[in-house]
Amino acid sequence: MREGNRRAPVHDAIVVGAGVVGMSTALYLQDRGYSVLVVDPRKPGSACSSGNSGSFGIGLTAPIGMPGMLRQVPRLLLHPDEPLFIRPDVMLGHGALWFWQFARNLHRARVQTISAVRAALNARVLETLMPLVDIADCRALIHHRGMLFLFEADKPSPMAQARFDVSTAHGIDVRPLTRTDIEAMVPQAGSQVGCGVMIPGNWHCSNPAGLVDAYAGAFSARGGTIRMVPVSRIVPGDRPSVIADGVALHGRNIVLCAGVWSRELLRPLGYSVPMLAERGYHLMMPRSGITLGSPVTLADRNVVMTPMDGGLRLTGVSEFTPADAKPKHGRALRLARQARRYFPDLDDGNAEPWVGPRPSTPDSLPIVGRAPHHRGLFFAFGHGQSGLAHASVTGRIIADLIGGRPPLLDPAPIAFSRFERL
């Protein structure tokens, strides 16, 4: 049926986006008894949800931006081995407002406010994640092994220590480690390592793509429908619809979970979303020669090493560039160079690079809740580097709002209206 045909079926909810946020939301809605349609041009979980570090980051409450960070930007941009790349046309063009807002959030008071919201989200991760994992029967992918941070000096850098202090202030167990402790935990680490920190409460997923695939399989098995077609337009109103591949799909509620692509879908509706594509790269090494008991962050080099079902994954690059720009996989190879400083025996001869555009907001918080100007439209995007962690919390909040229940968390601090006030 083409656009405008009123015989098209009406779903209780249409979820636009089949990443980990979209599928988490769809499962929660379905579990509440709603008929749900998921629409995405890509296979579920094949974009950013498949390429992340796998860490839920439950103990990491500080935002990306911290006081003093602006002083580091010139060095980060000019040195080829640093983890940050910003295309000048993004910084000076459509991204200028984003970077201005990012700078505003570097003040200590703002960091405290943002960290409190992130801590509240993190505190609900396991409570909301495990019901979905049980529905999808994929507990084998979820592990509680903590997160180890390694440093080259005999104590963490001031910036890293500031982040740990933020976590500690929110009740997170942060344990300093000596060189002797590290030798016992990661004997393959070289002499470059001076000290470490362990956050034992962290959890990780050993196959993020497999997790979303399990969600999608459970959703379909329980009667849900997934259509892999491109979405060109959202039509709000008394009879909301999504125009997908020229067809009008009708739903009583529409939930936008399309990551960085949500921005363009909302522009015709009058919403100016401060969100940039922060592309992340990873290297997957099926035979790395390194055995890790837990994810390891090489903090001085901004590299995360995660043991996955298919080998060792290295992540840690932020590239602000258009989402569809040609990948520069040499930036992913940087990860192996940096990691070898800590693990000299690392074998990256069979490494496979990957890149995906994370939807990044200037305050490291997602955009979740009701659309302020259109009834029946809900936002669930902008999770940046915390999509895996906060997907289940987001899904539960959206299901609560659509169902007219008191939401699990007050969505006001993560609502779109915080940007309209600016």
Image (cartoon, helix red, strand yellow):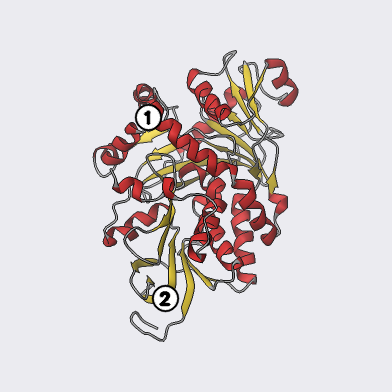
Q: Report the residue at 71% width, 26% height from top.
A: 186
Q: Residue at x 51, y 18 (%)?
A: 157
Q: Which mark is residue 50?
A: none
Left-right relation of 183 to 194? right
Crowding at dot 2, Cα within 10 Å, few <14 / some 14-19 / many 20+, comes out as many
Residue 286: quarter of image: top right
Q: Amino acid at mark 2?
A: His
Q: Does 30 sit above or below residue 366?
A: below
SS for callout 1:
loop
* Quadrant for the C terminus in the image: top left
Name the amino acid type tagged 1.
Leu
Residue 236 percent location from the top left of the image: 34, 69
Nearer to me, 65 or 187 = 65
Considering only order in the chain, which callout, 2 or 1, is on the residue closer to the N terminus? Answer: 1
Which residue in the protein does label 2 denote?
250
In which quadrant of the rendered image does the N terminus lie? bottom left
Tag 1–tag 2 contact (CB < 8 Å): no
- The outermost residue toward the left is 93
Circle 2: element type: strand
| Residue 106 - label | 1
Q: Residue furthest top?
A: 154
Relative side of 384 to 195, left or right: left
Q: Measured from the top left, where is residue 150 in percent x and y?
A: 60, 23
In front of the other: 50 or 226: 226
Residue 317 shows up from this direction? no
